Image (spheres, rainbow, N blue to C red):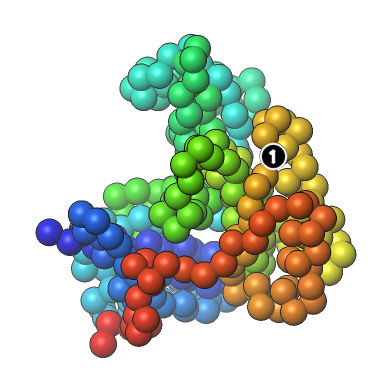
Amino acid sequence: MPRRTIGIEIAPEAIRLVRVVSGWRHAHVDGWQVRAVPPADHVDHRSAVVQALRELSGAGWFKGDQIVVSLTGDQVISRTVAVPFQDPQKIAQVLAYEVEALLPFDLDQVVIGPAAIETTPTGSRVLAVALPKSRLTALLEMTTEAGLDPSVVEVGAIGLARFAQAAFPPAEGAADETIAVVELGQTMTTVALCRGGRLAQFRTISGGEGRSLPEGEALLAELKRMVHFYELEERSPVAALYCCGVRAPEIESGGVIDRLVEQLGVRRLGGIPSWLWPPGSPSGIG
């Protein structure tokens, strides 16, 4: 039977929601919504988020098999570690202790989990994410107050990697090829670097309080820095780039993405397969 998954991102300036219906051989977007809310530093932000979630629930948006809440990348810390085994259960048991020395928090202040696991001849490489418990508690309090019961909380870059895996599966003979997915948002830009269909690294540029996002040449330099850092650290070149997000048309009109593709020497990916986003896909329940 088809499975309905509802994804929610509670960003600083808006709630974004997407509903995906997946079957045995395909998946497609069944509908989406964007609700503006006061900025995160505004006194009414929390109550506005709760009210918007209640309204979406009342409209039937959360009727499905699974609710996934996505966190923006600036809310978590990511670290890559190597462990000498491949069993996911063993990895989960030791992961916190493996990354403890790499975090600016005590272990009792954070929740730690694997964003991606890549097996190696000697064990596994794990991309770990750490979320302060105070942020997780605040998030779950909001969703509970709105009457929701999310089953998964994950970082948004995982969703970008999942999209890249579905839309641009590795070609034969290119299983380890790296794709950079760049999401250009209103208040932040996220780069998800996906190798062999898995999330390998991610970086987020956030404007932050009193600061604006980089534009033009400053944005180009920042994106190039992210890609080059990955290539040096992983000793693996980025082969292709996909650009998306609400600011993508604006940034592209300035030629930034074309210059990035040219200067990095990568190929440009575009379009969304019809099986993932069929023509006429509704923006509401209908």
As displayed, is residue 93 above or below residue 46?
A: above
Residue 161 position, x and y percent, is 49, 50
Judge whether 32 appears above or below 286 on screen. above
- Residue at horizontal 52%, vertical 79%? 36
Q: Tag count in the figure?
A: 1
Give residue 113's quadrant in the image. Answer: top left
Residue 135, percent from left and from top: 51, 48
Image quarter where the C terminus lies is bottom left
Residue furthest to the left in view is 1
For label 1, the residue is 237
Question: What residue type is disc 1 on?
Answer: Pro
Q: Position of residue 104 (x, y in %)?
A: 67, 31
Rendered position, 18 above or below 158: below
Q: Secondary structure at mark 1?
A: loop
Q: Residues within 10 Å of mark 1 (few under 14, many from 20)?
A: some
Q: Is residue 76 visible?
A: no
Looking at this view, name the residue that lies furthest to the right. 217
Q: From the image, which quarter does the N terminus lie in? A: bottom left
Which residue occupies the foreground of this view, 233 or 236? 236
Q: Residue drawn at (21%, 58%), measured in percent from left and top?
A: 23
